[in-house]
């Protein structure tokens, strides 16, 4: 407990943008075959430092086979909401779940260079107290730490629907399930919210048998992955509306609400439209009578490619699908970054008018049957995937692995983990920084990035930017 | 009339001071008024929000003071009542000292239901209890008089006192908290929201212990 609010808590997105820049990044290190223990890499982001762009510390966990994926903070700017009265927490711990093992690590990063494991929550505790498995997205909110899960109970995670559970933000005790009325929700992936407006939005990937052993082509072609998002009354814990984008919009993944809490809209990325292999972004918003609406506002076309150059999975299609696997919105709600993991492109859209996004910048790197090299001459395995934006919106970082078994299907033969950074022009535009290229230790891939002091996919703000 | 060495004026002063104390404490809700004004982009929303916060706080004060104002009818037990009341306030302070977790129930309230939130926040933090020893001091009856006063007239005197204590306290709370909220909204800007936010948890719990101790000593001194 501090006597003053943590200096990294900001009342509004605008104040967060004006705060000092990030010094370190925390990035997932995952061993795809479970032969090594997973970990968190601490990367030096200070351009003046001798170790700029290098992994300066690693927290390697004692177990193997956890499969790290997404992770988050114990506390963020949401703590400045007087409603929950948690203003004096410290942004100090990373909550890192293993999506294969269901084990959760609490990592103390108060001193980034001496980051260490603070607590381990064993899978049995997660199963017992929640009936869920495969914990995934982390957000800190009114009742503590919210953790979304990808699996329900039972060995293969299909005994009952997956959902969200709540953890105590100080003791990290698992409190229990979040949902009181889940309505039609039977799959889960991401979730986020608008705290003053008291709504939450959640999304769907698929059930564990649909992803753990690799993508299941029959399920994809018969549209059995998730294609709905759910709107919740956050504090009443009740699903108030389920919005189906349509069967063909397979895998509605990342939810990115506008950061400014006066706004009632956001975005959701869809991996693939099975009718034409396009990637799609939907804008969702609340209309005047309180009903949620959505509209497809961005489509990204597949690129025709000779079957010989394609992995087995795609040979029959003669094209490379964009595969929109991650999106991220800058804190000023101006630029939406869209990772096209299949194409090997990072797109930047100006979403000042959320109903009418305009492509403002683009970087090519990696990609199926293309493998664009980094400006420093080195290769980039797979394609641009998990993306994170600096608080001031001037730097965009990304890594390359999607999910162990899926990497191998879409990019057979590729290996390695990389993290790169692109600089954003004053009025948009995106250019890779030739001097920032992190190559992960042999045998490790990389996934989500968190920036010291918060970033554009962690912090929830309780006061508008004025 | 002196109560435990404190004059009636000093006790009323304490009612006002505690109001200011509660008002400037962010835990009693002034940041919500700032938020309301910014969300709706008009200053009037701040006044409305603070009105609701004040209502909730006022009701929480009454909810605690009224039962005590009825109890004090038992004149011959008034010292015991004041000792027990003081001990209760101390116990609440100690509880808050030991249990530093925040009440999760507050996080379940819809952000627009400010009066309910304010009521629950005041109850959970023992804001009303902090007033009890002061209020009982104001109601104290000289032992020499107890024989002459009928229960009815005692009640007739104590109920308005409870009401006035709650009114004066809430008015001070509103003025103090409202001023902070208004200053941040109009001049200082959101940056000061986190800058002016101090962790009063410890001080708050200690205040309860102190006020409770005062209640007991003044009751015994009076006896």
Image (cartoon, grey):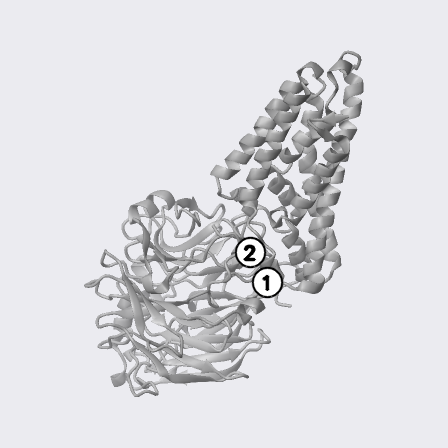
Q: Position of residue A145 (x, y in %)?
A: 44, 52
Farthest residue, direction left: A35
Q: Where is residue B199 in the image (x, y as percent from the top left)?
A: 55, 49
Mark 2 sits on what residue? A80
Would you call the spot at circle 2 few (<14 residues within 10 Å), some (14-19), or many (20 or more)?
Answer: many
Closer to the camera in the image, B40 or A435: A435
Closer to the camera in the image, A452 or A143: A452
**Residue A41 showing in the rendered view:** yes
Mark 1 sits on what residue? A261
Residue B18 vs B68, above or below: the answer is below
Q: Nearer the viewer, mark 2 or mark 1?
A: 2
Residue A206 vs A316, above or below: the answer is above
Would residue A119 be found to the left or right of residue B200 on screen? left
Residue at left offset 71%, top offset 52%: B178
Would residue B40 be found to the left or right of residue A235 on screen? right
| Earlier sequence position, callout 2 versus callout 1 | 2
Would you call the spot at circle 1 few (<14 residues within 10 Å), some (14-19), or many (20 or more)?
Answer: many
Residue at left offset 65%, top offset 22%: B221
Q: Is mark 2 on a helix, strand or loop?
A: helix
């Amino acid at each position: 407990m501090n006597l003053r609010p943590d200096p990294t808590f900001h009342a509004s997105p605008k104040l967060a943008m004006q705060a000092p820049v990030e010094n370190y990044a925390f990035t997932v290190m995952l061993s795809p075959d479970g032969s090594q223990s997973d970990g968190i890499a601490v990367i030096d982001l200070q351009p003046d430092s001798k170790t700029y762009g290098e992994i300066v510390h690693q927290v390697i966990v004692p177990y193997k086979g956890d499969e790290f994926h997404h992770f988050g903070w114990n506390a963020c700017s949401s703590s400045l909401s007087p409603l929950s009265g948690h203003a004096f927490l410290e942004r100090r711990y990373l909550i890192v779940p293993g999506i294969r093992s269901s084990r959760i690590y609490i990592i103390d990063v108060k001193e980034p260079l001496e980051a260490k494991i603070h607590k381990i929550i064993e899978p049995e505790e997660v199963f017992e107290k929640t009936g869920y498995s495969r914990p995934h997205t982390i957000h800190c909110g009114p009742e503590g730490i919210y953790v979304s899960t990808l699996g329900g109970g039972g060995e293969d995670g299909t005994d009952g629907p997956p959902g969200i559970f709540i953890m105590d933000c100080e003791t990290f005790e698992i409190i229990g399930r979040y949902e009181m009325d889940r309505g039609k929700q039977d799959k889960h992936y991401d979730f986020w919210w608008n705290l003053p407006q008291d709504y939450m939005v959640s999304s769907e990937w698929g059930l564990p048998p649909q992803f753990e052993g690799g993508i299941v082509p029959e399920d994809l072609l018969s549209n059995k992955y998730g294609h709905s998002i759910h709107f919740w009354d956050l504090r009443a814990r009740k699903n108030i509306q389920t919005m189906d984008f349509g069967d063909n919009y397979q895998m509605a993944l990342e939810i990115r609400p506008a950061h400014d809490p006066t706004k009632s809209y956001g975005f959701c990325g869809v991996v693939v439209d099975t009718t034409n292999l396009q990637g799609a972004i939907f804008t969702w918003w609340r209309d005047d009578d309180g009903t949620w609406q959505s509209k497809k506002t961005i489509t990204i076309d597949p690129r025709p490619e000779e079957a010989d150059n394609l992995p087995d999975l795609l040979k029959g299609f003669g094209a490379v699908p964009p595969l929109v696997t991650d999106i991220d919105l800058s804190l000023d709600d101006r630029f939406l970054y869209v990772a096209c993991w299949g194409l090997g492109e990072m797109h930047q859209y100006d979403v000042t008018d959320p109903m009418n996004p305009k492509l403002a910048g683009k970087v090519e790197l990696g990609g199926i049957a293309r493998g664009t090299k980094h400006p420093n001459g080195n290769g980039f395995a797979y394609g641009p995937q998990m993306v994170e934006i600096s608080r001031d919106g001037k730097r965009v970082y990304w890594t390359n692995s999607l999910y162990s078994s899926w990497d191998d299907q879409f990019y057979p033969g590729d290996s390695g983990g990389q993290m790169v950074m692109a600089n954003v022009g004053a009025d948009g535009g995106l250019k890779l920084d030739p001097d920032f290229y992190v190559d992960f230790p042999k045998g490790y891939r990389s996934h989500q990035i968190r920036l010291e002091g918060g970033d554009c996919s962690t912090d929830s703000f309780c006061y508008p930017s004025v | 009339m002196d109560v435990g060495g404190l004059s009636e004026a000093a006790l009323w002063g304490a009612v006002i001071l505690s109001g200011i104390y509660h008002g400037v404490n962010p835990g009693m809700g002034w940041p919500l008024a700032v938020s309301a004004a910014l969300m709706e982009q008009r200053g009037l929303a701040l006044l409305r929000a603070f009105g609701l916060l004040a209502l909730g706080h006022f009701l929480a004060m009454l909810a605690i003071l009224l039962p005590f104002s009825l109890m004090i009818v038992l004149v011959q037990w008034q010292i015991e009542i004041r000792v027990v009341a003081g001990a209760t306030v101390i116990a609440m302070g100690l509880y808050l000292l030991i249990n530093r977790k925040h009440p999760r129930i507050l996080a379940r309230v819809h952000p627009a239901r400010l009066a309910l939130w304010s009521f629950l926040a005041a109850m959970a933090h023992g804001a009303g209890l902090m007033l009890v020893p002061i209020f009982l001091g104001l109601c104290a009856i000289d032992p020499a008089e107890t024989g002459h006063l009928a229960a009815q007239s005692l009640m007739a005197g104590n109920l308005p006192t409870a009401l006035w204590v709650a009114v004066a306290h809430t008015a001070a709370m509103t003025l103090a908290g409202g001023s902070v909220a208004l200053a941040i909204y109009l001049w200082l800007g959101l940056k000061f929201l986190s800058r002016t936010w101090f962790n009063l948890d410890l001080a708050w719990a200690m205040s309860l212990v102190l006020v409770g101790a005062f209640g007991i000593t003044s009751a015994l001194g009076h006896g």
